[in-house]
Amino acid sequence: MKANDEKLVKQRIRERYKGVSEDILDVIPAKPREDFYKPETIKRVAVYARVSTDDANQTSSYELQKNHYEDMVRRKENWQLVDIYADEGISGTSLQHRDSFIRMINDCKAGKIDIIVTKSVSRFARNIMDCIGYVRQLKAADPPVGVFFETENIFTLDENSEMSLSFIATLAQEESHSKSEIMNASIEMRFRRGIFLTPPLLGYDKDENGDLVINEEEAKTVRLIFFSYLYGYSAQKIADALTELERLTKRGNEVWSAGSVLQILTNERYCGDVLARKTFTPNYLNHKSKKNKHDRNQYRQQDHHEAIISRDDYFAVQKMIRNAKYGNKGYFPEIRVIQDGILHGYVTVHPKWAGFTVDDYYEASAQINNGQIPSRPLEIQLKKGSFDLSGYQLVRTPFISMYGQPILSVSTTILSFNKSCISKLPDADHIELLVLPGKGMLAVRKAPAGSHNAILWRKANNGEHVPRLISGTAFLPTLYSLFGWNSDHQYKLSGTVHSKDGETVLLFNSREAVLLYEDISIESADQGVEVSPRKKRRRKGKAFPSDWANSFGEEYYTSQGTFRALEPDGSDWQAYKQGSVYSKGSDINVTTPQKAAENIKQILTDMGVSDD
């Protein structure tokens, strides 16, 4: 029965599709399409021309295109020229900066244009998405706007034009890709051979070989900028002074900005070096440059040309600029290494200084001890009747919860002391942090008067002192690297207190740090039942190093030797002794603020500026 029904349905379909007689069907013919070459009505025509560079030699190309299309429109019956839209010195792979192209499209949307004439698909757009996208937009307009590509003889209002256009647009885009790759390869080969690009630079001219030579008049401005910054002036104050002095930029502008001053201060060419490929263009279609963070090869050549500023002063300025981001302005950053006393070899740190690396702290500590990280062998002296604790372990402080124990919590951005830490140094509003590289020790002491390393660590609250959160965005990542910590986590350290002669030091051992992690526990009577997020309870969990599994702590005497507080005579305690400034190699030759002031005065005199 079912088979018979299916046969009946098929039969009815066949009968329906036999159609009706043409004698009883009236056909209303469509309006014939106008011949593009011989239109019957007036057509408003726009011409689009583009040359890829604004070089003077390209002017002839533009003028030829302009004259050609003016003659072409004039010869066509019923064609009227609306305008010639031209972009000079603009790439076709992006619409960025193609102002004339965008203006032409807007005129099309406003109904001012019927036909666009251009030389080729590559002149219109080398980006296939832009090309096909705009052609479709124009075709869908009311009335539709057609684009005629002369070289390819394609008119987009023809029904069969899109396939040909898509194919040719793809080839045009790929041609741009190939040119981009060839250009990048050419630049790479130039850089590998030390052939660098030398754009116009204040303070320098180019000789007949294209090499940089100092322009002494312009160099005065450059030196004035660097010495002023070393003296302690901000980039904005320097810019204001240069504007008032009517000193000219390389482009001849008299008005300076902080940004233009910083561009000079951060340009390595002023110390005679060249660093090639600071930025690169990852996408040839949008031409957006990106800072090169080791994504592409870079090439540096020292002493490439004569320097205006010493290399010592240049790198000192770079440190000052980095530190200025964290509020440290007006002085050259410094770290100090303790040469004597119980903190011998410890290096001062400041959580707002970003100019120093892990290597700097190691080298600073090693600087005072013939290149070796200071350490002192532990001598065990037992008095008569004393127990020999050799072979015994001192239980690690994280395993013991004691009332009043100093606790330090650390993240990559914040330092946080507990109230017990504050109470151990009752007369200290400001503290200094010190590290002993290689040993993983962190010390806290009262900051000496006038210390640039001083940190405000407490505040008043209802008549008592409470800890203050310390921001350390600049330094703490370096601290994490020094201690070998995971930057994704927070850490908690239990401290010990050491006092003598009225001087107190808090000591924290990074090797006994406890890792803190977020533990999400679920409160539910039934296991395996999905629980609402509101019923999830968040808390901090603790994680201990795996190598602690088989021991309670360090050997007793080794642990005591970590902090050399058991000296028989105690003659070298001196816990508050001021350290000496660490000078990294050429930092010794950095221009001092006093010398910078003298140089500024001499430069202004050479410029003809009076002392008034």
Image (cartoon, rainbow, N blue to C red):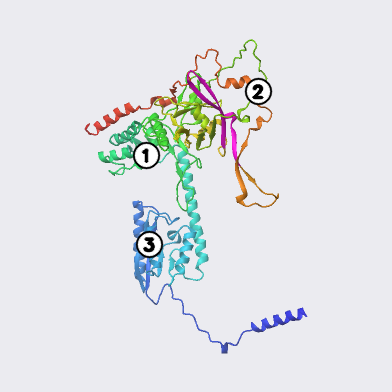
Marks 2 and 1 sit apart, C-alpha to C-alpha, by: 56 Å
Q: Is residue 357 left or right of residue 522?
A: left
Q: Position of residue 143 (x, y in %)?
A: 42, 72
Q: Is residue 124 depicted above or below 411 in this figure?
A: below
The secondary structure type at the circle numbered 3 is helix
Q: Of label 3 and label 2, which has the lower sequence position?
A: 3
Q: Which mark is residue 103?
A: 3
In the image shown, does 182 or 291 lie closer to the viewer? 291
The secondary structure type at the circle numbered 1 is helix
Q: Which stretch appears magenta?
A: 490-518
Quadrant containing the C terminus in the rendered view: top left
User: What amino acid is labelled 3 in the image?
Assistant: Arg
Q: Which residue is mark 2?
A: 393
Q: Nearer the viewer, mark 3 or mark 1?
A: 1
Q: Which residue is mark 1?
A: 262
10 Å crowding of disc 1: few (<14), some (14-19), many (20+) = some
Q: Is residue 29 left or right of residue 450?
A: right
Marks 3 and 2 sit apart, C-alpha to C-alpha, by: 82 Å
Can I make out residue 586 in this image?
Answer: yes
| Residue at far top of view | 384
User: Picture quarter containing residue 93?
Assistant: bottom left
Q: Position of residue 505 (x, y in %)?
A: 50, 24
Marks 3 and 1 sit apart, C-alpha to C-alpha, by: 37 Å
User: What amino acid is labelled 2 in the image?
Assistant: Gln
| Residue at far right of view | 1
Q: Are marks 3 and 2 in contact (CB under 8 Å)?
A: no
Q: Of label 3 and label 1, which has the lower sequence position?
A: 3
Q: Nearer the viewer, mark 2 or mark 1?
A: 2
